[in-house]
Image (cartoon, rainbow, N blue to C red):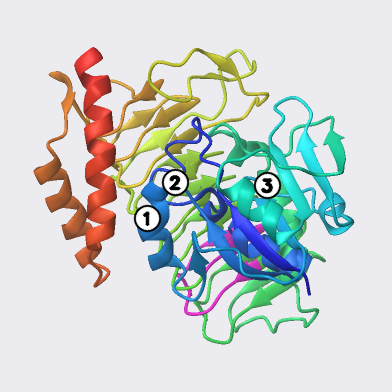
Amino acid sequence: MTPAIVFDDNHPHLSPLTDLRASFDIRTGVLTMLERLRLALDLDIVSLSVPEHLATITRERHPSLRVNARVESASPVLLINGRCPLSYEPIADLQVGQSIVEDKTGSLVAALVSPEAASAFLAGQPLNAVGVATLPFPVLLSRPWHVRTYRDDCIQSDMELLDDGEPADIPAGVTAFGEYPLTLSPSAKIYPGVTLDLEHGPIAIGPDTVVRPGVTLIGPCALLPHATVLEKALIKGHTVIGPHCKVAGEVGGTIFQGFANKAHDGHLGDSYIGEWVNLGAGTTNSNLLNTYGEVICIAAPGMSNERTGQQFLGAIIGDHVKTAICTRIMTGSILHTGSMFAQSAAVSGCVPGFSWATDAGRRPFRFEKFLEVAKAAMKRRKLEPSAGMIERMKALHDQAMKHHDRG
């Protein structure tokens, strides 16, 4: 098996997705990109390479893997960009000395090279590859809304990778219809009165999940370990509820990274929800313009409007964002890490990280208060932020304050 190194090339415009995780740890479907790479290509991942500001928290997420270590291999090494969610066939066919790049950006997608060439590339030197294949279409995430762009294909791929081919027994009192497969962990608790709609895609319900009475799940969708779906929730297709999330209301086309709460009524569509987000009762977002036109977004403060290629696009919500009751979030909003919203006006556009937004206006969220709230939220899951995570959040806060000062 060829040894592989998955690298994060520190793309500057993926925030807030990569504020507190490496690019390969973004959940773009049922799986993160690292999990999908490992399964789809049957890889022997020997190490991970990340920007130094993510090294500590990446080691904490992946204690069994070497991070930013020397390349130690006697055979050629497969380098894979952690921003690559799919398009694995060309990677699997690489021969020694060959590489794949995106034609438009020139970004390296993957290469199979000598250990010396791999070491040099990871140290910042140009890759010396004999054969270079260019892909005429984009295959790498480069903007936060690309989790929506690749969502459907990623979910389909993941469902196929995870399908064990064993038909699940339908629990007593549960209504199921349709021909697509159901994957159901023996430790999941599915209450009577739940409806499983398998007409449009498969449903996967993972270990230690709870689905309360009156819930409707419409495939394709997945509930990951320790997720809870509360009474009468409507979970529509292309939704992935990440580990340790609690979800209610109407949710469709949304990926939850994990450890987030939407425990009350309200609509959430075509969105990405980071970790430790809490959406207050009645929080609702728009995922379609009244004009039915293409959604235009600003990825980060100071950047320009960009076409997203999407007609349906809700909100990209960074880690540790909180919303008060009845918060309205407009189409294509990008809410950066650590912001707090308690305003009656609709939230819209690109909001800098660590914003405290009320009807009196928007001001910086003091780091000491932010950290107090973050610790309180994590304590509810019997967790606490590590010293490395606190250091990274403080660095993000310092960066965000520069935008607030300019604003």
Q: Is residue 26 left or right of residue 374?
A: right
The residue positioned 56% from the left and 38% from the top of the image is 270
Determine the image quadrant of residue 4.
bottom right
Query: Up-down: is 224 above or below 320?
Result: below
- Residue picked out by circle 2: 273
Circle 1 packing at 10 Å, graded few (<14), some (14-19), many (20+), is: many
Question: In the image, is residue 145 above or below residue 189?
Answer: above
Is-magenta flag for residue 220? yes
* Chain part drawn in magenta: 204-224
Q: Quadrant of the C terminus?
A: top left
Amino acid type for the residue under numbered disc 3: Cys
Could you say whether the residue bearing mark 1 is in a helix, strand or loop? loop
In terms of secondary structure, where does tag 2 sit?
strand
In front here: 353 or 397?
Answer: 397
Instruction: Estimate how packed mark 2 is, as few (under 14), some (14 to 19) or many (20 or more) residues with alpha carbons within 10 Å.
Output: many
Q: Residue at x 52, y 13 (%)?
A: 305
**Residue receiving disc 3:** 84
Q: Check whether the beta carbons of the residues at disc 1 and disc 2 lie within 8 A of each other.
A: yes
Residue 312 pos. (x, y %): 62, 30
Q: Is residue 356 left or right of residue 31?
A: left
Q: Tell me the residue that label 1 is attached to.
A: 260
Q: How many marks?
A: 3
Residue furthest to the bottom? 186
Amino acid type of the residue that numbered disc 2 sits on in the rendered structure: Ile
